[in-house]
Amino acid sequence: MGDAASPLVTTRWLADELGAADLKVVDATWHMPASGRDAAAEFAEAHIPGAVFFGIDAIADTSRDLPHMLASPEIFAEMVGALGISETDRVVVYDTVGVFSAARAWWNFSIMGAAQSFVLNGGLPKWRAEGRPLEAGARAPAPARFDASPLVGAAVSATDIRAGLGRPDAPQIVDVRSAERFNAEVDEPRPGLRRGHIPGSVNLPFPDLLDGGEFKDVAALTRLMAAAGIDPDKPVITTCGSGVTAPILNLALGVAGHEQMRVYDGSWAEWGADEKLPIA
């Protein structure tokens, strides 16, 4: 895979490995509700050969009134097992943007015990641009057994964050929303949410980490993190609008050699809606 420590794989590597029994390719495309786009329908029209579709809103805790919250280990294991995926497989996740919602699915797999989980750098756009093969339709994979071993504390709650506010030993909270949203200069895309950010958090918009749908090089990522005031050797919690794009920063940290897997799962969809929670 090139750099064995990196959570990314290249299109060339994936093309060479397609068809391997232990390789599972996953399309985790997700679109904002207001986009009017249907990711599952787009998958049926064209996807990387052998891929299965991971529905971020379906493989989730649907009992909550927040979108795509992390599923219980039991539900996650059942649903990804039905996709033919085992925790011992090499899992490569991609999306149709480049690097976007694939990071969320990668985080799901990684913290549930799939130790060989990766994201396709550049995603489907790069795959298409290189003229690599696609297929249509949907397959019914042979079910597999996924034995989940969740990473305790990876999904952080609002209670966890509030308990640490103002404490000198609290983890760094990094918000990957746009600077305009972080600074309360524009309304949130989801109605009913307050403007602002979690007190004490810093801002590093996720698009700054990318160039043409691929991650910038390690030197550039390291400079961006330093400029935002992030010390990647200390605990980090990422947050965003609803938990989809926060893991892009976790992924970038991994690319730079720092494993930081904690995500505030409810993100601003939860914090911005709760009048009892403080904002800055």
Image (cartoon, rainbow, N blue to C red):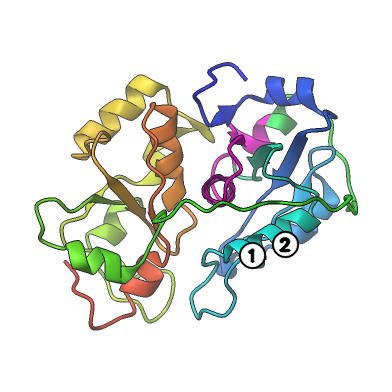
- Amino acid, disc 2: Glu
Q: Which residues are magenta?
A: 98-126
- Amino acid, disc 1: Glu
Q: Nearer the viewer, residue 72 or 247?
A: 72
In this rendering, the answer to whether 30 lies above or below 66 is above
Q: Which picture quadrant has residue 164?
A: bottom left
**Quick one: SS at disc 2?**
helix
User: In the drawing, does residue 218 fall left or right of residue 48?
Assistant: left
Any part of residue 110 in sight: yes
Q: Residue 199 placed where, x, y %? A: 17, 63
The structure residue drawn at horizontal position 53% and vertical position 18%, both measured from the top left corner, is: 3
User: In the drawing, does residue 264 fall left or right of residue 62?
Assistant: left
> In the drawing, what numbered circle is on residue 99?
none
Q: Residue 271 placed where, x, y %? A: 32, 72
Is 134 colored magenta in this rendering? no
Q: CA distance from mark 2 to mark 1?
A: 6 Å
Is 106 colored magenta in this rendering? yes
The structure residue drawn at horizontal position 77% and vertical position 24%, both measured from the top left corner, is: 17
* Figure quadrant of the N terminus: top right
Residue position marked by numbered label 2 in the rendering: 78
Residue position marked by numbered label 1 in the rendering: 74
Q: Nearer the viewer, residue 44 or 77?
A: 77
Within-10-Å neighbours for mark 2: few <14, some 14–19, many 20+: some
Within-10-Å neighbours for mark 1: few <14, some 14–19, many 20+: few
The structure residue drawn at horizontal position 16% and vertical position 66%, both measured from the top left corner, is: 280
**Quick one: SS at disc 1?**
helix
Q: Which picture quadrant has residue 37?
A: bottom right
Q: Residue 210 placed where, x, y %? A: 45, 35
User: In the drawing, does residue 257 fall left or right of residue 199?
Assistant: right
